[in-house]
Image: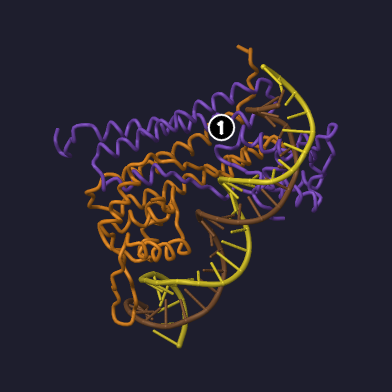
Chain colours: A orange, B purple, C yellow, D brown
DNA sequence: ACAGGCATGTAAATAGTTACATGATTCG
DNA sequence: CGAATCATGTAACTATTTACATGCCTGT
């Protein structure tokens, strides 16, 4: 079966423990957000769809007048999730406005391109800090994969920040002509 | 003025030399594609819009019965492009199905997670090769930024492939317990 | 009482891809 | 001639974000 990508995020997060739409959104924002986001506008309709085809099932978790529906994964849902996990990943995308600006920076003076690199670097370092903060949140860890992925986020962003710094020096370096020894 | 992101890609590519929609698409596919894509469905309507507001202007470049319209940037278009280039970049996104699968791999046996890492690595190495091929295409270079961005693509993908390899070893390593010396 | 977070949802807009239709030209 | 590529375009679809509406609960 071919489900939407949001469907698999949901299946992944309700496996193990039942979660509500709100809790799934919070979990996404706290973990996969930096490489896979999801909004309420995707989560809530998709939860209903998945319940409709029996891959998750609603559990009433209201407390008093506060309504809340958690969804638990079904056996079919778990099978579907594993099936998807075993297929080789396909989509891989990157959208970096900073790189696009840098790419076209021939229209500007070098000092201005350096500004773009500095903004990019700052953004990456901020993200590293946010990811590090997430890392501290979780103490008890049984499953090695979420922290592994989180570390990827940290290391990649550090690498990227470093690349920006290197390019900045390169642009500022006294233009060494090729052939000059 | 706030234009669509596609608009700036177009302005960037028609600066310097007039280009047709077809040529812009080809240029994108050959350079910015790995971090900023654009399809015909975006390019052609956007070209008309930009011509409508006077940021580019059409030049008939038909040869015989073969119709072709190239677009040249106007003074307003150039000003708009520079203005955008000077604003700090904002959007930065990554969508990595592989990382998502890895994240949820607790549902599988470790050997299966390793398979995901191998697929990811293979994809990254393939991309490195495609990017290196692009690098060779251009000989004469006046503008340092496009090759700089291209090198970023190559180095990032190499870094990522390497990360996959490291994680694979980590998963396959005889689980060294913390505290064992 | 009020702010802020919990909780569920939807409407509308925007973005982006895919697939198709049309027709010319070039090369083997 | 037929295939590939040049060239322009659009319709339909899917994905995704944003902003809003509604109402409860907790702490100050």
Q: Position of residue D17 (x, y in %)?
A: 53, 58
What percent of the width, then of the height, locates residue B100? 38, 47
Residue, x 84% and y 34% (percent of image)? Answer: B65
In this view, D11 is above or below A115: below
**Does residue B131 appear left or right of residue A137 in this picture?**
right
Farthest residue in the left direction? B180
Query: Residue B30 lies in what quarter of the image?
Result: top right
User: For this rendering, which residue is in front, C23 or A132?
Assistant: C23
In front: B94, or C19?
Answer: C19
In the figure, is residue B58 to the left or right of B181? Answer: right
Q: In terms of secondary structure, where does tag 1 sit?
A: helix
Q: Quadrant of the C terminus of chain B?
A: top left
Where residue B162 appears, as percent x and y from the top left, is: 38, 30
Q: Residues within 10 Å of mark 1 (few under 14, many from 20)?
A: some
| Direction from residue C25 to residue A85 in the image, left or right | left
Q: Is B68 on the left-hand or right-hand side of A180? A: right
Report whether residue B102 is seen.
Answer: yes
Q: Nearer the viewer, residue A135 or B72?
A: B72
Q: On screen, B24 above or below A61?
A: above
Residue A108 visible in the displayed image? no
Name the residue: 23% across, 50% down.
A141
- Between A83 and B44, the residue placed more toward the observer is A83
Q: Mark 1 sits on what residue?
A: A167
């Amino acid at each position: 079966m071919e489900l939407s990508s949001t469907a698999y995020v949901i299946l992944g997060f309700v496996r193990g423990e039942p979660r509500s739409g709100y809790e799934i959104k919070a979990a996404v924002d706290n973990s996969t957000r930096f490489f896979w986001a999801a909004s309420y506008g995707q989560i809530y309709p998709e939860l209903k769809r998945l319940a409709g085809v029996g891959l998750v099932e609603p559990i009433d978790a209201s407390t008093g007048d506060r309504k809340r529906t958690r969804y638990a994964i079904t056996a079919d849902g778990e099978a579907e999730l594993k099936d998807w996990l075993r297929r080789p990943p396909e989509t891989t995308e990157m959208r970096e406005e900073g790189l696009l600006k840098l790419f076209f920076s021939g229209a500007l003076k070098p000092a201005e391109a350096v500004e773009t690199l500095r903004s990019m670097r700052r953004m990456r370092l901020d993200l590293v800090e946010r990811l590090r903060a997430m890392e501290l949140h979780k103490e008890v860890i049984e499953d090695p994969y979420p922290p592994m992925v989180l570390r990827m986020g940290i290391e990649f962003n550090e690498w990227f920040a470093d690349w920006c710094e290197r390019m900045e020096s390169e642009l500022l370096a006294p233009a060494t002509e090729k052939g000059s020894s």
